[in-house]
Image (tube, rainbow, N blue to C red):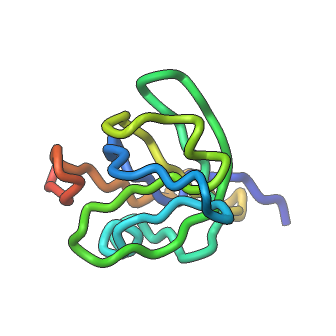
């Protein structure tokens, strides 16, 4: 069986709320946002910084639900500034036969990183 890498979940235009250089690494994300985009704690994520064009890979960790937290930790903290807008994406391997009908979960947020209907 052949598989295709497809977008699984996306947080669209979330705002960086914290930078923690003295940390092991990762990106802390409001657990409600993780759930709404089906991104799991410790799952690999791709981050695209809309403000400066940086693109990098790290992993997700949970921040308190409803907090709106998007914290870049460790080396990733050098790739953004507080207030920068990010796209955070996760991917999945999908059987080629299912790819045409596959739909990712995309979460849009307001200026406080709270989910909105779109």
Image-based side of 71 in relation to 67, left or right: right
Q: Quadrant of residue 31?
A: bottom left
- The residue located at (34%, 68%) in the rendering is 30
Q: In this view, does 48 lie above or below 98?
A: above
Q: In this view, does 65 lie above or below 109?
A: below
Q: So how many labels did they put on this image?
A: 0
> Where does residue 106 sit, x and y in percent of width and height?
36, 54
Rendered-image quadrant of the N terminus: bottom right
Q: In which quarter of the image is residue 77?
A: top right
- The residue located at (31%, 55%) in the rendering is 107
Image-based side of 81 in relation to 1, left or right: left
> Where does residue 71 sit, x and y in percent of width and height?
44, 56
| Farthest residue, direction top | 52
- The residue located at (63%, 69%) in the rendering is 43
> Where does residue 2 sit, x and y in percent of width and height?
83, 59
Q: Is residue 86 above or below residue 92?
A: above
- The residue located at (17%, 44%) in the rendering is 111
Image-based side of 99 in relation to 32, left or right: right
Looking at the picture, tell me which residue is in the foreground, 73 or 117. 73
> Where does residue 53 sit, x and y in percent of width and height?
54, 23
| Farthest residue, direction right | 1
Image-based side of 17 in relation to 67, left or right: right
Q: Quadrant of residue 114?
A: bottom left
């Amino acid at each position: 069986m052949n598989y295709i890498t497809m977008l699984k979940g996306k947080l669209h235009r979330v705002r960086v709320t914290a930078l923690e250089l003295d940390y092991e690494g990762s990106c802390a994300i409001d657990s409600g946002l993780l759930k709404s985009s089906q991104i799991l704690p410790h799952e690999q994520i791709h981050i695209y910084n809309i403000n400066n064009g940086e693109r990098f890979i790290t992993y997700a960790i949970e921040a308190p639900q409803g907090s709106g937290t998007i914290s870049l930790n460790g080396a990733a903290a050098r790739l953004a500034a507080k207030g920068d807008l990010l796209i955070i994406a996760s991917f999945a391997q999908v059987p080629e036969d299912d790819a045409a009908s596959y739909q990712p979960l995309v979460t849009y947020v307001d200026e406080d990183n709270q989910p909105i209907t779109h």
